[in-house]
Structure formats: C-alpha cells, structure tokens
C-alpha cells in the first residue's frame, strides 16, 4: 500500500513540475506579447503561481515519494512546502506595490476599456 | 488590552511559530525542540502585540482553521487551474483576445487580515491584479484582463465573490 502511495506521489509531483515549466514558458511568452505594463503583470502572475508555487508543491510530493533519500526526504518536503506557502503569501505584496507605483507615476494603461481609478483620482 | 488577551495572543503567535519551526526543521530531536521553544518564545514576546491587536481567541477556533484548509484546497485545485488556463489561452491565441481595464470592486469586510487576504487572493489569480485600495469607500481598483462588465456588483460577483465568503468565515 505504501509503495502505491509513494509512486502516486512521485508521478503527481513530476506532473506538477512539468506544469510549472510550461507555465514559466507561457509567462515569458506573455511578457513578450502583451501590450503594456499592467497586462504584463498577469503574465508574471502565471510565472509566480504556476511557475514557482505549483512546482514546489510538486517537489514536496516528489521527495515524499523518493524512498532512497531516507531521512532527508522529510527535510526536502517540508522545506519546499514552506517555501511554496511563503511565495504564495508574499508575491502579491510585490505585485501590489509595482501596480500601485506604476499607476501613480502615470504609466499608460492603453489599450483599455475603462480606467475607474484615474476617473476617481481626477475627481478628488 | 488586558492580561488574558495578551497571554492568548502570545500563545497564538508562539504556537504558530513553533509549528512553523518544527515543520521547517523536519525533526523532533530534543535539541531542535528546545531551539524551537526558545526562538519562538523570544520572537512571540516581541511581536505578539503587533501581530494580534484584538480578539486573540479567533486563532484557537477550530472552525476557522477548517475553513482555511477548505479555502486552501479550493483555491489551489479549482480556482487557480481555471484562471491559468484562461490566461494561457489568451497568451497563445494568435489574435490575443484581451480587453483590459481597471474596474471598481466593492467589498464588505472590516478586519485588516480579511482585506489583505482578499487582495492577495485577487492578485494571485492570473487575470486580475489589485492596483489600489480605497479603505474608506471599501473598494478595490482591480486591473482585469477581460472586462465583461463595469457594474460594481457584477464585477464583485465575477472577481471576488467566492474569496470574500471564505475571508469572512476565516477572519471575521
């Protein structure tokens, strides 16, 4: 039974790691293709959550499935799990600071359908 | 703040830090446990009044932790894959179908932790980024990659509806 769980963990972890590589590639493509700073932030989010948090969760599962690591696998597993959580909690703080600073310093939001923030700020 | 609240706040921060230390060190040897107790005690003594300002009993409520676990699973297994798929489609599509814009998203939460969690959740889903916050008017300004509607309540339903429910159950 434990063998089955180990190999399931290993393969799910590998799948997550491959997903992470794909998400990083897509994020890089998005950074190249998207028209302005704010839309590029969305591509960067794909790179953060899909490209860093998911592979680290995958690494957690993968190391749990790796019998030959012996004692060290719990260290690897817990380390990557905690790193994933911390990235997921702290990365948006950076995105918020970048987005707010960019908007306040007048980076163009073109192309856009609407910009309620600029409307409200003009009204103040 | 009276003494009971202080002790409860200290205990909450201490237990969280100690659990964090144990998971990070991945060992239950006596030396590690002693080190964890000392470090968690020192850090909690300095920071507990800053981290928990009021109502420390919330940290010991099992239902809140249960909803946190449910939210964690829901967020990483359902919401994130769907949003990633959506944005990946827009990146790879030859015509690049985006209609970006900044919309207002009202929220109805009081605590700092709840609002922070809501903002972080919105930013962490690809396709929406919080640009600014109006604390008195209780609304976020969210840059949305595909503006379907500019009505505030419709935006709220589409962007933050699910998160807000969980934020209220966890922190309010």
Image (spheres, coloured by chain):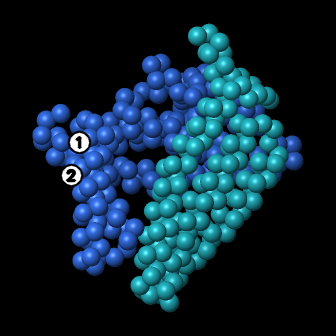
Chain colours: A cyan, B blue
Residue located 33% across and 53% down the image: B66
- How many numbered badges does the structure rendering display? 2
Query: Label 1's element?
Result: helix
Vertical position of residue A71 compared to residue B73: above or below: below
Q: Secondary structure at mark 2?
A: helix
Contact check, label 2 and label 1, Cβ < 8 Å: yes
User: Which label's residue is closer to the chain start, 2 or 1?
Assistant: 2
Please provide percent x and percent y for residue B83.
63, 48
Position of residue A41 relative to residue B142, above or below, is below
Q: Locate residue A33, reporting x and y percent.
A: 83, 46
The spot of residue A71 in percent (x, y) is 41, 84
Badge nearest the viewer, 2 or 1: 2
In this view, the residue in front, B55 or B33, is: B33
- In the displayed image of the protein, which residue is found farthest to the top? A123
Q: Which residue is mark 2?
A: B11
User: Which numbered disc covers residue B56?
Assistant: 1
Q: Nearer the viewer, residue B48 or A27?
A: B48
Residue at 37 percent across and 29 percent down: it is B110
Crowd band around label 1 with a 10 angstrom C-alpha radius: few (<14), some (14–19), many (20+): many
Choose top left, top right, bottom left or bottom right for residue B144: top right
């Amino acid at each position: 039974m434990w063998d089955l769980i180990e190999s399931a963990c290993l393969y799910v972890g590998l799948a997550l790691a491959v997903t992470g590589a794909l998400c990083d590639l897509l994020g890089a493509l998005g950074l190249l293709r998207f028209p302005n700073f704010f839309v590029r932030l969305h591509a960067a989010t794909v790179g953060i959550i899909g490209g860093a948090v998911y592979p680290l969760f995958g690494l957690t599962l993968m190391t749990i499935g790796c019998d030959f690591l012996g004692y060290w696998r719990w260290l690897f597993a817990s380390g990557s799990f905690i790193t994933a959580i911390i990235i997921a909690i702290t990365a948006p703080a950076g995105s918020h600071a970048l987005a707010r600073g960019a908007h306040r310093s007048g980076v163009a939001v073109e192309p856009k359908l609407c910009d309620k923030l600029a409307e409200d700020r003009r009204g103040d | 703040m009276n003494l009971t609240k202080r002790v409860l706040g200290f205990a909450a921060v201490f237990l969280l830090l100690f659990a964090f230390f144990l998971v990070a060190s991945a060992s239950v040897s006596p030396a590690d446990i002693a080190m964890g107790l000392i470090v968690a005690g020192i850090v909690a003594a300095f920071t507990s009044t800053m981290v928990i300002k009021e109502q420390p009993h919330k940290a010991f409520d099992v239902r809140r932790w249960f909803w946190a676990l449910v939210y964690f699973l829901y967020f990483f297994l359902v919401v994130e894959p769907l949003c990633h798929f959506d944005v990946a489609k827009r990146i790879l599509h030859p015509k690049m179908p985006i209609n970006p814009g900044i919309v207002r998203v009202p929220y109805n939460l009081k605590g700092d932790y709840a609002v922070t969690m809501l903002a972080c959740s919105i930013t962490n889903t690809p396709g929406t980024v919080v640009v600014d916050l109006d604390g008195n008017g209780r609304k976020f300004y969210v840059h949305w990659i595909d503006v379907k509607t500019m009505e505030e309540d419709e935006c709220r339903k589409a962007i933050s509806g699910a998160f807000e429910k969980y934020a209220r159950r966890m922190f309010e």
